[in-house]
Image (cartoon, grey):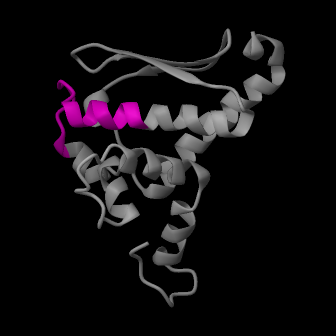
Amino acid sequence: MGTLTGIANGPAVNEDRTLATPFLRCLIRLIRAQDTHGAWEGKLDADLLADFILTKEQRREIPIIGDPDPDVLWRLQIFYACVGLVIEERSGLVASPIMMIGQEGFGRVLLTTGRLVVLSKTLRDVHRFGFGTLGKLAEAGTKMVDDATAAIDVYPDVALA
């Protein structure tokens, strides 16, 4: 996976564990599926996810008010599509993302399965979309999936409708 080896519990080993989470494995598959010309074939998984990482210093450099560029919108769509796919892997039900974002970077994302809304999130400052570390990226996606599958478990009849 392109990390250092031989360090007992160092950052390299933790990065390998993080990349092995079901959410990040799915996200990597989705990103690689978008590579129609093979430009990312030789890239490491961690390098493919690097655009999702936004450190505090990088976040400070981005203006508070701004329009999201197409690359940020693409990452946002891939992220929520991945949430939907992992929900489907866990529950066996298709979870479809619906996203509406205005030019200023504000909007909403919904994931539905059957007639059940399994995720509803308000989006703000989309032009600053990113996570501090790979671990936080995996944690955020996994939490959304966990919450959505819990809702499916509580309301299975609505999810199947």
From the viewer's perspective, tell me whether residue 37 is left or right of residue 44.
left
x, y percentage for residue 5? 47, 86
93 and 55: which is toward the camera: 93
In the displayed structure, 37 sits above or below 95; it is below
Let me know if residue 129 is in the magenta part: no
Front one among 3 and 134 = 3
In the image, 86: left or right of 152? left
In reply to whether residue 64 is colored magenta, the answer given is: yes
The percent position of residue 15, horizontal first and vertical second, equals 49, 68
- Give me the residue at 26% from left, 44% from top: 59
Picture quarter with the N terminus = bottom left
Is residue 137 positioned above or below 102 on the image? below
The image position of residue 98, as x and y in percent, is 46, 16
Q: Residue at x 21, y 30 (%)?
A: 64
Judge left or right: residue 111 versus residue 62. Answer: right
Q: Residue at x 17, y 34 (%)?
A: 63
- Of all residues, the one furthest to the front in this rendering is 37
Q: Is residue 3 above or below residue 98?
A: below
Span of residues in magenta: 61-78
How many numbered tags mark residues here? 0
Q: Furthest residue to the bottom?
A: 6
Rendering quarter of residue 85: top right
Give the residue displayed 56% in from the left and 31% down from the top.
Answer: 84
Q: Is residue 61 left or right of residue 80?
A: left
Query: Is the residue 23 above or below the residue 98 in the image?
Result: below
Question: Which quadrant is the C terminus positioned in?
Answer: top right
